[in-house]
Image: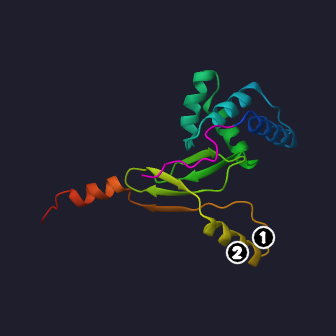
Amino acid sequence: MPKKRVDDLQSVSAETALEAEKILGNRLAKLGLKQTDQRRKILQVFLQTRDHLSIDELHQQVKKLDPKIGFTTVYRTLKLFSQCGIASEVELHDGISRYEPQLNRRSHHHLVCTECGESVEFFSPEIEAVEQRIGKQFRYSTTRHSFQIFGLCTNCSKKRTSAPQVRR
């Protein structure tokens, strides 16, 4: 069975964490906002997590570190992460936006079960080539893309085929 997550690295390096903090600091400065301790804590927790997190899930994890950090602060900070390339937003099977660390990660794609929500990440040089070709064709300098395939995982397929058929 293939791995469910295909990270180049199993954890974020100290250098990447510093780079993320610098990128965020630059974005905040452009917006006239300050780099706060709460934003640093949110960044720390987010980068340590290798999952696809909803805003609520990240908020629950951040509260363990600092119970005073509110949902709105996490929401706004995560949106800032997305704007400056630290995070990418992905919608899987349930319509809930989830976020994953993007900084210094290879572009990857998702195979998503529409029944149970399980997802598998994969790399595809062919999809990367299509992105580049289409960008060139329309004179775009592409920076990223999102690609997801939806279907049934092995377990859900087995459940469907082994479920008794109801006659009418």
Q: Main secondary structure of the magenta part?
A: loop
Q: Is 10 within the magenta?
A: yes
Most foreground residue, 126 or 64: 126
Q: Position of residue 121 (x, y in %)?
A: 53, 53
Taking the spot 57% from the left edge, 46% from the top edge, the residue there is 98
Q: In the image, is 152 to the left or to the right of 27?
A: left
Callout 1 amino acid = Tyr
* The image quarter in which residue 137 lies: bottom right
Q: Earlier in the sequence, mark 2 or mark 1?
A: 2
Most foreground residue, 30 or 45: 45
Q: Which mark is residue 57?
A: none
Reading the image, the residue beneath label 2 is 134
Dot 2 and dot 1 residues touching (CB under 8 Å): yes
Q: Which residues are magenta?
A: 1-12
The mark total stands at 2
Q: Residue furthest front?
A: 1
> How far apart, in angstroms, are the residues tagged by discs 2 and 1?
8 Å
85 shown above or below 150: above
Reading the image, the residue beneath label 1 is 140
Q: Position of residue 21 (x, y in %)?
A: 78, 36
Callout 2 amino acid = Ile
Identify the secondary structure beneath mark 1.
loop
Q: Position of residue 58 (x, y in %)?
A: 58, 35
Colour option used: rainbow
Within 10 Å of disc 2 (Cα), the crowding (few <14, some 14-19, many 20+) is few
Quarter of the figure that contains the C terminus: bottom left
